[in-house]
Structures are given as structure tokens and as C-alpha cells.
Amino acid sequence: MTGWSTYTLAMALFLSSHFVPRLFGLRTRLTKILGPQLYFSLYGLVSLMLLVWVIIAAANAPFIELWPQLPWMRWVPNIAMPLALMLAVCGLGIAQPYTLGGWHSRAFDPTVPGFAAISRHPLFLSLLLWAGAHVVPNGDLAHVLLFGIFALIPLAAIPAFDAMARRKLPPETGRTYFEATSVLSLAPLADPSWRRTNGRKIGYRALWALLLWALLLALHSPIIGISPLPA
């Protein structure tokens, strides 16, 4: 297979892995057969393997330059990635069911919104930051397509999940849900009550996010083959 055909196949399988299980109740049936824990563990492993394949395939695709990489461009992902990882780590298991990585077995409590007060879609925003920031220094066609597609996913998914919440929640509950949460707001950080309730937990998670960022920064060159640091 050529570089482009391998890349196209990898991307098609990766995207299909996120949509096919939703068709015809397939995910529901597999969850009942395997159990939620085993199903989502296997699903996560397959998704990760396909993601690695997509990244490798993009690196091996024919190089077609759309714009040159300028020295300042590497600063964009270096600034964005700590923020993206904080959103991902702080938002994983968020106590609201209408988003990626949300706590689906628990109804949302608007009186205790937790991290949802900052963002009700933290993992989608993390993906958007990661993809959008990496488009800037990677101006070849294969990587623009790669990161561009990943950036489009949260832009489409956030309105879709919000629409689902409006459909499923009773009108009054839906109103309080959207009043207590935000797509992105830093206002809760200035609220003493919110900080007392969530500050310690969010602080620990933010520290883990920074440690993860440092680890990924160190592993970027040996795994990806390119230094992420500005020249």
C-alpha cells in the first residue's frame, strides 16, 4: 500500500471505531455481553492502537508542504499543551453525563457542579487545543488533515451533546444545568465557595497534569522523532 492509502485506511478505521458502535444498538449489546468495564477497557485499547497507527501513517505519508515551519510556531503547542492536559485530567470523570468522559451513572447536581462550572466539555476542549495548536507548526498536507479532522470533532460534538442534554432533561432541569455549567469559564476560580469545595481536588489534578506534560515533553523526541521545543 502507498503512504496515502495506508494513511486513509488508518484514519477511516479510527473514525469508524467511534461511530460504528453507536449504530443499531451495537454498543449496548456488547456492553451487556462483556460488561461495562471490559467493554470500555477493550474499546479504549483499540482506540489508542488506532490513534498510534494514524499518527505513524501521517508521518509516513508523502510530504506536501502547505506552509513552512517558522521558529515561533513551535511555541504554540508548547503553550497550549499544559492547558490541554489540565482540562483533560481535571475533567476526566466529570460529574455530568452529557459529554465525553462524563460520569454517566450519576445525574448532574446543579448545586454541586464541580469542574463542570469551568467546562462541561473539558475533554473535547482539550482535544481542540491539542489539535488546533499542532496544526500551526505542522504545515504539510498529511498533518493538516490529521489535526484538522481532530479539531473538527469537538467543534461538532459540543453542540451535539448540548442538544442531547436539552432533549433529555426536563425544561426546568435543563435551564439550571446550563446556568450552572459553561463551555469554558474561569469565573468559578474567583468564587470562594467553589474553591473551598473543589480547590484541593482540582489542585491535585492540575499537579498531575503538569507532571504528565513534563513526561510527554520528554518522550516526544524518542517516540515521535521530532523535538517539540522551540529552536
Image (tube, rainbow, N blue to C red):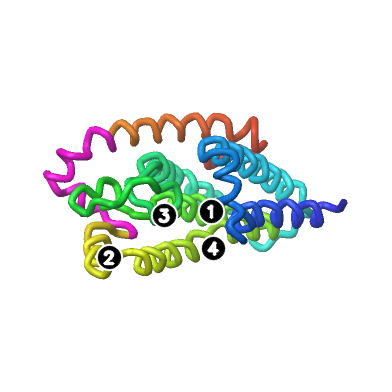
The first of marks 4 and 2 along the sequence is 4
Coordinates of residue 174 in the picture (x, y in percent): 27, 65
Predominant secondary structure, magenta span: helix
Disc 1 crowd rating (10 Å Cα; few below 14, some 14-19, many 20+) is many
Residue linked to disc 4 = 152
Q: Quadrant of the C terminus?
A: top right
Residue linked to disc 3 = 99
Give me the C-alpha separation between circle 4 and circle 2: 26 Å
Disc 3 crowd rating (10 Å Cα; few below 14, some 14-19, many 20+) is many
Which stretch is magenta? 183-202
The first of marks 3 and 1 along the sequence is 3
- Report the number of discs: 4
**Residue 21 appears in which quarter of the rendering?**
bottom right
Give me the C-alpha separation between circle 2 and circle 1: 30 Å
Query: Comparing marks 4 and 3, which lies closer to the viewer?
Result: 3
Query: Is disc 1 placed on a helix, strand or loop?
Result: helix
Residue linked to disc 2 = 174
Callout 1 amino acid: Ala
Q: Is residue 65 located in the magenta-colored stretch of the structure? A: no
Coordinates of residue 87 in the picture (x, y in percent): 38, 46
Residue linked to disc 1 = 131
Q: Is residue 90 above or below residue 11?
A: above
Query: Comparing marks 1 and 4, which lies closer to the viewer?
Result: 4
Identify the residue at image location x=14%, y=48%: 191
